[in-house]
Image: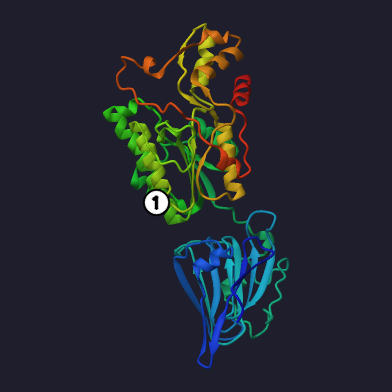
Amino acid sequence: MSDLAVEQTPIPGLLVVHLPVHGDARGWFKENWQREKMIALGLPDFGPVQNNMSFNASRGATRGIHTEPWDKFVSVACGRVFAAWVDMREGSSFGTTFSVEIGPETAVFVPRGVGNSYQALEDRTVYSYLVNDHWRPGHAYPALHLGDETAAIRWPIPLDSDEAEISEKDRANPRLAEITPMKPKKTLVIGANGQLGRALTAVFPEADAVDLDELDISDEKAVAAWPWADYQLILNAAAYTAVDVAETPDGRRTAWAANATAPALLARVATEHRLTLVHYSTEYVFDGTATEHTEDEPVSPLGVYAQSKAAGDIAVAGTPRHYILRTSWVVGDGKNFVRTMAALAEKGVSPTVVDDQIGRLTFTDTLAAATAHLLRSGAAYGVYNCTNAGEPCSWRDIAAEVFSLSGRDAADVGATSTEAYFAGKDGVAPRPLNSVMSLDKLTATGFEPEDHLDALRRYLKA
């Protein structure tokens, strides 16, 4: 009996698992799949939903090479097999081959897109595999000829011998040169026409990009009908951001549908299909009384918009593979405060801007880059604050900087308080006065946001 251990192979993600087998005169016992222990050793938490058994009556029974569109955990319940795999995924490892003999003491994790095959070495061999998707009739997938010359698998029992039993279907499989590599599962950007959505599609150019007229994520039936089995990642950039309109009866319903119901439906989908969900939130989930907001500060939303966003955060946090990026004062390709101030500067207008709301700008290209970094670096799932870096400013400071960079005198921008600015106006949502968020957790992952005033200069120049 050896200790439980996991071994890497030349095929990325294909892992050999060495299993302790406890035996005596009666036979043997093993923990064939033990989620907690195996995940701790590096196996993916792949979420099996179906267990299949293949009985092989005689030595020489040979099956494969089949490339099913799901992950598998293969082992034997009885007997021994020679097993071989060929990487059929798009990329530099396409065509890489690995083989090993499997008995009770060995199992193998096979990632989606890797062709699987085996040959029974004993009569009455039972081959077992856990899979993380349900088999569906009529679902086609790539298959490779068992004797492909490029793969050059050294079968213990020659394929052309009388002892090798192979189905006519497997004998007719194509060679590697005829195979179309399996593409990875896709990324979906939701809210693609917004400021953040445009930045995300630039950083994830291979992604499917949809807006709410194509996929209404607040509609349970529409969400259920989407082909989620084709995806591995959701980037949810859709949100209702009309802060003051959210205080009206119609606005309240729309805000809750977009900011709370929709993320909850996406979280359910992400859990069911084992997807990663990236969701974008706001400093409005806090009341703005803390000197600096950290990721573990309890939410304390003030208005309807803020409350609906906090509810969405709570829903998304319930799915295992999630990133929530909380941000503030977003600036990108679209209508925003910086563009408004630049237009006023050009028109010769001298505005009055609040000087008691403090924070940092967040440019959408920085937010998109931080998203890509968290995903590609394998950062721990959870909540991350994400703004640009630098010394916090007031909205009046930002407006003055925009005027100065536009050739106007910064003194042309007047100052007022939030209370005075909204005095006598109805239906105004409360604002957090302090929007400054700690970036320590984000920078600890290796991502350093650009200074927001440097980014502002770059943005205006562009």
Whether residue 217 is visible to the viewer of this picture, yes or no, is: no
Residue 8 location, x and y as percent?
Answer: 66, 65
Residue 115 location, x and y as percent?
Answer: 61, 65
Quarter location, residue 165: bottom right
Q: Nearer the viewer, residue 183 or 147?
A: 183
Q: Nearer the viewer, residue 9 or 456?
A: 456
Q: Nearer the viewer, residue 354 or 316?
A: 354
Which residue is located at x 54 percent, y 50 percent?
380
Residue that lies at the very extreme toward the bottom in this rendered image: 25
- Helix, strand or loop at label 1? It is helix
The quarter in which the N terminus is drawn is bottom right
- Is 284 placed left or right of 209 in the picture? left
Which residue is located at x 48 percent, y 61 percent?
139
Relative vertical location of residue 426 with respect to residue 279 in this rendering, above or below: above
Q: Nearer the viewer, residue 310 or 355?
A: 355
Relative vertical location of residue 222 with respect to residue 72 in this rendering, above or below: above
- Is 231 placed left or right of 269 in the picture? right
Label 1 sits on what residue type? Arg
Quarter location, residue 449: top right
Q: Residues within 10 Å of mark 1 (few under 14, many from 20)?
A: some
The quarter in which the C terminus is drawn is top right
Which residue is located at x 45 percent, y 68 percent?
50
Q: Which residue is mark 1?
A: 268
Residue 354 location, x and y as percent?
Answer: 45, 17
